[in-house]
Image (cartoon, helix red, strand yellow):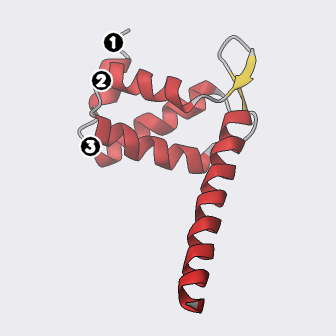
Amino acid sequence: MLKTKITLLFIVSLIAEKHCRLLNLLQMKIVKHSGDIVDFNPVKLENSLLKSGASQLVVDVILKTIQKEIYEGISTKQIYKMAFSLDSSNTTGFIKSNYFCR
């Protein structure tokens, strides 16, 4: 019984930690190319990567990594550079070739 309670508390703490991290990401401010300061929105990054031709699996890996590495005040240019470098090192570089065609 005690082992079950400890396991349950551990699981709840992991969920709470993940939830707090997500809330912090959504409140994190980033700097757009125009100089505007906006809240980081992982959905926008996901949509952009998907539009560039990346598979959902690749996008998920890139998002998970970037969300660990971004910081308050990072520029969108730096975020996209991170995404492209991750794509180049982990896949065929498909995102980079399609994104820069715009």
User: In the rendered view, does 40 fall on the left or right side of 82?
Assistant: right
Q: Are marks 2 and 1 in contact (CB under 8 Å)?
A: yes
Above or below, comparing residue 35 to residue 16 in the picture: above
Which of the two marks, 2 or 3, is nearer to us in this view? 3
Q: Which residue is mark 1?
A: 101
Q: Which residue is mark 3?
A: 91
Residue at the extreme left of the image, as rendered:
92
SS for callout 1: loop
Amino acid on which disc 1 is placed: Cys
Q: Position of residue 96 (x, y in %)?
A: 35, 27
Q: Which residue is mark 2?
A: 97
Q: Position of residue 88 (x, y in %)?
A: 33, 40
Residue at the extreme bottom of the image, as rendered:
2
Q: Quadrant of the N terminus?
A: bottom right
Q: Quadrant of the C terminus?
A: top left
SS for callout 3: loop
Residue located 37% across and 19% down the image? 99
Q: Earlier in the sequence, mark 3 or mark 1?
A: 3
> Rounded to the nearest whole Å, what is the CA distance between mark 2 and mark 3?
12 Å
